[in-house]
Amino acid sequence: MNYNVNLDAYVIFMEVYETKNLTKAAENLNLSQPTISYRIKKLEDILGIKLFNRTNKGIETTIFADELYKNIKKSLENLKIVERELIEKKENGIGHIYIGVQHHISKYFLTPILKKYNKTHPNVRIHIISKGTNELVRLLDDGKVDFILDTLPITSEKRMLKIIKIKELETCFAKLKNSENKFIFPVVGSTMRTELDRILQLNDINIEPEFEVYTTEMTIEMIKEEMGIGYTIKDFLLHDIQENIDFIKIVEPLPKLVLCVAYVNYKQPDFVNDFFELIEDEVKMSDIY
């Protein structure tokens, strides 16, 4: 029997395995569903095994599919490492790190780490991509970033992610002493706003904010301009404002955010692992778990 299989067939198999949905797999690969079905059937015929069973609830994988997926995934991950090593050699030892991070985390947490890392790894080029959580996860799924820095929840429908907790971030209501008593909230749908609304509802507190702001930096700037009482991240606020702050007790305890590193769990180049170690050292030096 001829076991020569086109690599595209394995890419289709991986997508179907991860999505457990032919329609979703077809959309992700820009192919028609009949094409996906045909290619999977052809792969099964070539290998002589059943990979998927159709049920009323969708697609179920077989033990053969589980084993095939595990081995293909490992092979593709090793291939990615080889590709990076070849590029590094071609560029005379210059490595590249691609980091996905929300802008406020980059400004208040990541920048000092980047400065230290650059001194010890001058031959590594660092690429920072700032997006919202959903887009960052998509970049991670597609292999376009090595890891992301973001607050929980971080979930992927396509991959098993390794998530490491860096630190907890306290939130607060704060204003300057001469500020107006107007409220500045994060926008509806953001992690911070969702958790805040949950806590306020549990305590039968109803607040209609005068301002709804998309970024943490904007909230802090409005607090600095004495525009009202802002709900924000305490560590980041104290980074920019050290004096004349009034912390307002409206409800306790306030939600805490959990800052994490998330990445696809495969072998990383040594210079990427060095970056992880520097983050761990920074957290220890900050006396935060």
Image (cartoon, rainbow, N blue to C red):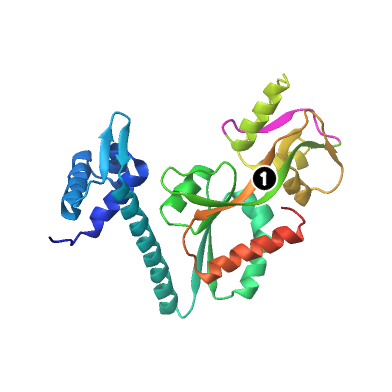
Whether 71 is among the magenta residues is no
Residue 73 to residue 82: above or below: above
**Residue ID at (44%, 48%):** 138
Question: Is residue 129 among what the camera can see?
Answer: no
Amino acid type for the residue under numbered disc 1: Glu
Find residue 258 and report its horizontal and vertical position in percent. Answer: 65, 45
Q: Quadrant of the N terminus?
A: bottom left
Residue carrying label 1: 217
What's the magenta bit mostly, secondary-structure-wise? loop
**Picture quadrant where residue 82 is located:** bottom left
Residue 242 or residue 249, whichever sits in front: 249
Q: Residues within 10 Å of mark 1 (few under 14, many from 20)?
A: many
User: What segment carries the magenta color?
Assistant: 178-189
Looking at the image, which residue sits at the far left?
1
Question: Is residue 140 among what the camera can see?
Answer: yes
Find residue 223 and report its horizontal and vertical position in percent. Answer: 75, 39
Find residue 140 and report its horizontal and vertical position in percent. Answer: 46, 52
**Horizontal arrangement in the rendering, residue 15 relative to residue 140 (left or right):** left
**Horizontal arrangement in the rendering, residue 9 relative to residue 18 (left or right):** left
Find residue 27 and report its horizontal and vertical position in percent. Answer: 30, 41
**Residue ID at (26%, 38%):** 53
Looking at the image, which residue sits at the far front?
63
